[in-house]
Image (cartoon, grey):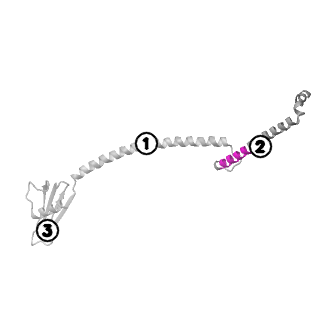
Amino acid sequence: MNNYISTLEPFLSNPQILFWLFVSYAIILLIFFIIIITLCVKLSKTKKRLKKFLPDDKNIDIEKMLVEYNQNVTEFLDREKEILEKIENNKQSLSNDIEATNKLIYLTNEKLKSAVQKVSIVRYNPFDDVGGDLCYAIALLNENNDGLVINSIYARDACYTYAKEIINGECPKHKLAQEEIEVLEKAINS
């Protein structure tokens, strides 16, 4: 220890060196003090920012919380992939269903063209001795005005029913009665 003091003795005996040594230590201490204050302010700001993200529990393990957060994000992304795959599969299935439905609609529309779409009925009384309009003519036509006319005539002693084929709005094989012409025109114009 004496060796150490003996080496410092020329510095300690000179008051000017001691003054500058004291000033340099004071400046260093002031710099350290400013650094400590700056670090305390930054630490305080960081704590305030962390309070926004951390629960009020004082004994929270941030590392554990970040690991849980990372696991939750990974699980969410995995679920998102599964959901997107299901959506893609459903889109394909839905696309197939739409295509099948469109085909079914087309086929149904094609079949409906030949279905009865125009119907008309006319009631009449051709005989003076029979009361009421017991006779009738019915026209049943499809979209192309193809179908048939049914004429039912009721008399006191008998009842007669006639069916006549209609092609493109006309009866090529038989002559139509006045009531049949009337019911056919009503059906075509309906």
Circle 3: element type: strand
Check contact, mark 2 vs mark 3: CB within 8 A: no
Along the line of sight, the residue nearer the viewer: 176 or 72: 72
Amino acid under label 3?
Answer: Tyr
Q: Indicate left or right for 52 with 81 as reference.
A: right
> Which label sits on residue 33?
2
Q: In this view, does 154 lie above or below 100?
A: below
Amino acid under label 1?
Answer: Glu
**What residue is shown at x 92% (from left), y 28% (from top)?**
2
**Which quarter of the image is occupied by the N terminus?**
top right
Q: Where is residue 52 in the image (x, y as percent from the top left)?
A: 64, 50
Residue 56 is a magenta residue: no
Q: In this view, does 75 lie above or below 13?
A: below
Q: Position of residue 11 (x, y in %)?
A: 87, 32
Q: Mark 3 to mark 1: distance in Å?
A: 65 Å
Residue assigned mark 3 = 124
Along the line of sight, the residue nearer the viewer: 36 or 158: 36
**What residue is shown at x 59% (from left), y 41% (from top)?**
71
Q: Can residue 54 be seen in this view?
A: no
> Which label sits on residue 88?
1
In front of the other: label 2 or label 3? 2
| Quarter location, residue 183 | bottom left
Q: Where is residue 120 in the image (x, y as percent from the top left)?
A: 18, 62
Q: Residues within 10 Å of mark 3 (few under 14, many from 20)?
A: some
